[in-house]
Amino acid sequence: MERPRRVVIEDTVRRHDKWPQLQESVSNLLSKASNGEPIWPHLSELVFRRGVAIRGGFAANRWEDKDQLLNTMGFYHFHLGTTTTSSGMVSRTKELLFAEVTRDEFIALAIADHEVFAQADSEDGSVNHQRQWLWQLALERKSRDLPPGAAFMPYMISSSGHKTAIVFSAIHFARVVQEIDPKLDDPAYRAQLYENAGVAVPNNRKLKWALNHMDLGLVDANRVFFTLAYCKV
């Protein structure tokens, strides 16, 4: 996530009743996004504790190790702390900034507190006002520019609980590895990779597969990374 992005602030952010108190903290985060500074310290710490699929069988709750709002709505949530803790993450805050983050844009969409993660408030399955509002905001964004009455599928989720586009990217990555990996035994092919990238060919041309954020490629001992497949989501 460390790349300069064009920052967009939707009016739904400024209409939050605590915007006057939170404006400086939000601006701090948006400045980092605009300048290409690391913004991952503002993300949830749960990824370090619950970001690995449960082992030993099928999980009863397939969302236990996933960010449901991110997988369904496409909204990242960021803490608005302005100090860095010993863990390297910013201090945790009650209010969160929800945003769409692409390769080139950081679109600030809403401010909400942790109530939006509550699945249901009662036995009838109803959800709280904040969660309903965020779902409505997501639907409006997914349906914009569509003609009235058009049918669309806003939240494509695989049976595993992952976003379908991510599953397709993983399948594409597997095919790239299957195609390229046998060629890595050929010294001429490895040398051609460096020449095509305009990089001097080192004596040690040992390469290994790696992910650079969400892009797949090969990396060598000098940390030269050759991108072979982009994740578009």
Image (cartoon, grey):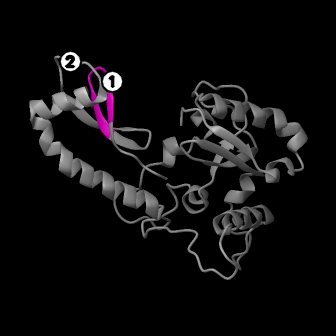
Residue drawn at x 64%, y 28% as measured from the top left: 35
User: Where is residue 200 drawn, in percent x and y?
Assistant: 25, 18
Is 181 placed left or right of 63 in the picture?
A: left
Closer to the observer: label 2 or label 1?
2
Q: CA distance from mark 2 to mark 1?
A: 12 Å
Is 102 placed left or right of 78 in the picture?
A: left
How many other residues sit within 10 Å of disc 2, few (<14), some (14-19) or many (≥20)? Answer: few
- Amino acid on which the number 1 mark rests in the picture: Arg
User: Where is residue 147 drawn, in percent x and y?
Assistant: 67, 76
Q: Nearer the viewer, residue 81 or 190?
A: 190
The residue at which mark 1 appears reads as 223
**Disc nearer the start of the sequence (2/1):** 2
Magenta-colored span:
217-226
Secondary structure type for disc 2: loop
Secondary structure type for disc 1: loop
The residue at which mark 2 appears reads as 202
- Amino acid on which the number 2 mark rests in the picture: Pro
Residue drawn at x 32%, y 56% as measured from the top left: 172
